[in-house]
Image (tube, helix red, strand yellow):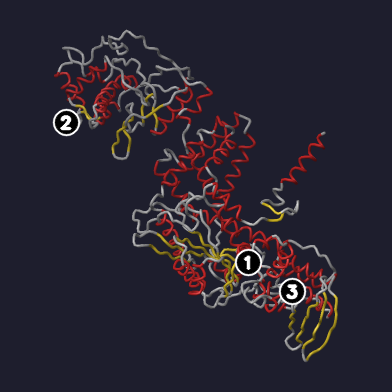
Amino acid sequence: MATEEAEAAVALMDSDGDGLLVLEDFMKIVEGAGEEEKQSDLIVFHSFQAHQKLLDLNSQILLQFLNILTLMENIDRLGSTSTNSAVEDGLGSTSTGSTSINDGSIMNDLRNPGGSLFDTNSNSDSEPESNNTAVEVSYLPDCPSQLKPYIGQIFLRLDDATEFYNKYARHVGFDTRKHGSKKKGDHVTWLYVVCSREGIGYVVNQFDEIHNHDMMELRHKRFMRLNRNIDLLHQKFILDCASANIGPTLTFKLLNEVLGGLDYVGCTVVEVRNYRRDLRAYTSGADAQMVLNEMSRKKENCPAFTYDFEVNSKDMLTRLFWCDPIAKKNFYLYGDIVSFDTTYSTNRYCMIFAPFTGKDNHGRPVAFGAGLLSKENADSFTWLFERFVKCMGSAQKLIITDQDLGMKVALERVLVDTRHRWCMWHIMFKVVEKLPKNLLGNEDLKKELNHCVWSELIEPEEFDEEWNKVPAFFRDFPMSSLIKTTSISESQNIFFKRYSKSRSNLVEFLMNYNNALDGQRSNNNRLEYLDFNTIPTLKTNSALEKHASTIYSDIGFKLIQSEIEEAVDNVTMVTVSNIGENEIYVVNDKFSKNWTVSYSTSFDSYACSCKMFGRIGLVCSHIFWVLRNKKIKLIPNELHGGRWLKSKFVKAVHCGFDDDIETFIVVDETKQEYRDMHGDFYDIARLIEVDGDKIRAFRQIMAEGRKEVLGEGNVLSISEKRLMIENFYGSHVPSQIDVHPPDVVKTKGCGRRLSRLEKEMREMSKPGRKCGKCGEVGRHDSRNCDKIQDENNKKKRRNQC
């Protein structure tokens, strides 16, 4: 090609007169050309491609124009060198078919009498000469024509073009990869092979289906990289499973069941694990700030929501407390007795989780608020108790804790008017360490000790004065027998741990906590529903029992019912007398123990020496006997109590309770419609799952509906995929981070691991316990008794014979 010919080509095609050929220059000319002219004029596209590929291979900046010299050189190169395809094969690039020059095209106008712009005798299909005598092996995959790309094929979106080629690759059995691309602004204008986005969409201008390798077998295709992609379906499913605290392995098993088998999952468990890893990495270093931002938004939307936090000198989060309006309402109703205990392994930073727990009118644990602490010392607990009292406006009357010294000091600082009680289980656990070993095997001593310690019916004077933390010293304290141990806190902690993982970041932890709280409150709502829509079964003909069934919750009524049965069947009168305005009844129960019931005629009130009503808020069988004896058919109001009534009758235990407290329970109609849409889809999918024609027809209907609802050109971009993760977390990563997550905390349980010998020595130093089955004192119990297991095995063998 001569220089003057190239100059003539540039002069003819250069629309802006700058001496440089840009893709726009060529497109302005070919827009009015016919189909045959466009096909032959694609040679200019190949010239751009050859020029850009050469620069790419030399690690230079990709240029978007051709000058006279490069146009001449690259067009000459096309006669002897083939270019790569739009999506390059993972093992080798594909080659192009021949590119002919048709008459009537714009390229004919570039010819002059002295010769042609292109050498018409050159063969574009000819192989380049090589000194290598080795014979190349090529493979032509078998593929239906409708799945095979063709030159001149046009796509409106780049994603459509790449997905079409990927479907072709999946079908015939090879992987693909992207080699390079160019952008003009936010639009991709070139993806190796050359693409244009100037009004006509994306054009396939080169395709070669010859490969230098065989195609994958059908049974291996699902392991190809193209078939192991986390697409929109997988992402949504993994995010939903993550919200439900389902791990990657179980998530993959669920995908296997939902999608119909391993061949149709579209990924392996490794991709699921990697996506969950990337999900956590999204909030790396920003999760503490995201949690605080979320709580700040809740505070703006709901003034009754309360939270507070502290940071150290490095702006790392060290303390956090939060409480929502429903938790406040629960405290006003049931917050006279509070159990407080801490737990570990709920988040990746090992921050100590410290919930405040009570018991509701169904006898179930109820949350009053929670905190996260970096240290288990007196200062941290003092800060947490101060925030709790400030949030609630008043302190609890009784608090149950373990024997942690930091808690004890903090309680003495903050809750000065609150009775502090140690967990009974921890007290009895200490007995083993205090008693001599020769007394540990004494069964009579154990029975007497347990009877003394756990009994609520003896007076304090009857017990050793040194035991000042046992139930006998709390008989006169209201509702003191409602919670004796921190087991309700431990139960609550176990419940929360079902919703959390030790690897969770703070955002995930808060999400899991809220999910657990929603589950707990949903169960409470279910019990309330049953209270008002279920008629209990009566066991006696007593009018008192019938009245009790209308005012007490299900669990409260069952406890009351047993007392009424006891009064009817086993309680008898011993004596009755009058002392002033009081009627004194002495009654005898089934244990042949006498109890004194006093009735004040002036105040119309009842009191029993067993003090059951004061201890747990329920009327005892002794008072019920007196009520029946006096022909009273309705339980007096002063004997209703406040704890065990149905929810609408429950009386607040703290002053200042506002029944109109903001709880912001809103029914989202959009979510309800979304739920109904899912139901409709799965109902149709179930009906047509075995009929391929109906499935294809339904997919076509959905595609048309997508166009009608979303319009043309709607595609899930990277930013929209990121939006899915942001919706999962409920917020985006903030640009400014003022509070950083803490370092990994060393809790009291941390330390070096014991060796096997040390564990055995420690186990041997513990006293033995008596097996309830074989009666021997040793290192086993009735659940793992070897003798019982041997006997059971012998019975099985005899039965088999």
> Where is mark 1, residue-wise?
424
> Where is mark 2, residue-wise?
17
Along the polypeptide, which appears first: circle 2 or circle 1?
2
Where on the picture, by quarter, is residue 795? Answer: top right
Where on the picture, by quarter, is residue 491? Answer: bottom right
Residue at (19%, 32%) from the top-left corner? 16
Where on the picture, by quarter, is residue 292? Answer: bottom left
Along the polypeptide, which appears first: circle 3 or circle 2?
2
Query: Of the residues shown, which amino acid type is indicated by label 2?
Result: Gly
Determine whether the residue tagged by mark 2 lies in a helix, strand or loop.
Answer: loop
Residue 415 screen position, x and y as percent: 52, 74
3D distance between C-alphas at marks 3 and 2: 102 Å
Q: Nearer the viewer, residue 11 or 156?
A: 156
The quadrant of the image that shows the C terminus is top right
Cβ–Cβ under 8 Å for marks 3 and 2? no
3D distance between C-alphas at marks 2 and 1: 94 Å
Question: Residue 692 shows which numbered tag?
Answer: none
Residue 297 shown left or right of residue 771 in the figure: left
Rendered position, 246 above or below 385: above
Determine whether the residue tagged by mark 1 lies in a helix, strand or loop.
Answer: helix
Residue 321 screen position, x and y as percent: 47, 64
Q: Nearer the viewer, residue 190 or 778?
A: 778
Would you call the spot at circle 1 few (<14 residues within 10 Å), some (14-19), or many (20 or more)?
many
Residue 72 screen position, x and y as percent: 19, 20
Return the residue found at the far left.
Answer: 4
Along the polypeptide, which appears first: circle 3 or circle 1?
1
> Where is mark 3, residue-wise?
619
Query: Of the residues shown, which amino acid type is indicated by label 3?
Result: Val
Residue at (46%, 34%) from the top-left corner? 229
Residue 365 visible from this viewpoint: no
The quadrant of the image that shows the N terminus is top left
